[in-house]
Amino acid sequence: MNFFYHFGKYLILLKDTFKRPLNHRYFLRQLVSEIDAIGLNSLGIVTIISVFIGAVLVIQTGYQMQNPLIPAYTLGYGLRESVILEFSPTIVSLILAGKIGSSIASQIGTMRVTEQIDALDIMGVNSANFLILPKILAGIFTFPFIVIISMIVSITGGYLAAVMWGISTSMDFISGLNYWFVPFEIAYAILKATFFSFLITSISAFHGYYASGGAVDVGKSSTKAVVYSSIALLLSNLIITKIILG
């Protein structure tokens, strides 16, 4: 019953969030600011993680491919499929859930415990729409681009590792990247990233919006935001994968 109570509050919060903004000029300015905070500020860590993960995947796959019966192009093919189908859309989103989710929850939670949200409500401002909608839209706009950049960087890191350390030749690796390429896989990854961005931003905002108490409670709300958004992400990943690819 506790789950349905909180899920109902979550749906009511979304209903209040997705309403027409009163001040469109301020909303656009806030949206640009959130795109910078959520998207651009996340490129650094995503790039670093992606390049190293791509290199590690190539090393591990190359170690398992010492059988001469396995085609040489399998290395590039395996890296491409792993990165596009799962690593970039799912693992990167989990990483961003920790970075972005905790930030959103702590920011909104601090405004709640310092009564800034109450002040907005007293002034007749839709605080949910004012605070949460720009963050959700910024996540939806930026996550697909972050995922695409992660794909490119991961494959580049894998290519450099394969060629520099003699795991594969450049021609064999590129042949594997081109082998049996299905463009729909890119669309599938972008679809997952878009949905994951909505879950991360909305669930994190929910926990921050209904935070209560003091600084310690804001920290607990941030932790809950990361945990619950990660669980929702993994569950939805299973469902989306089963529906589309199963």
Image (spheres, rainbow, N blue to C red):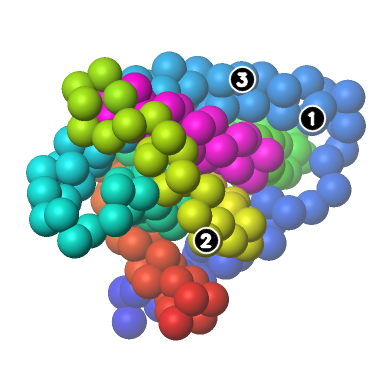
User: Looking at the image, is mark 3 or mark 2 nearer the viewer?
Assistant: 2
Q: Which residue is painted at 60% across and 42% down in the image? A: 144
The three-letter code of the residue at mark 1 reads Phe
Q: Which residue is mark 2?
A: 180
Residue count near mark 3 (Cα–Cα under 10 Å), binned few <14, some 14–19, many ≥20: some
43 relative to 30 in the view: left or right: left
Distance between mark 3 and mark 1 Cα atoms = 14 Å
> Is 160 in the magenta?
yes
Image quarter hosting the C terminus: bottom left
Assess whether residue 165 is covered by the magenta stretch: no
User: Which residue is depicted at the point 68% across and 62% down?
Assistant: 15
Which residue is the site of mark 1? 27
Q: Which mark is residue 121?
A: none
Secondary element type, mark 1: helix
Horizontally, is 179 left or right of 235 in the view?
A: right
Question: Which quarter of the picture shows residue 11?
Answer: bottom right
Q: Nearer the viewer, residue 28 or 169?
A: 169
Pick whichever of labels 2 and 1 is earlier in the sequence.
1
Q: Position of residue 241 (x, y in %)?
A: 45, 72
* Residue range highlighted in magenta: 139-162
Q: Which residue is mark 3?
A: 36
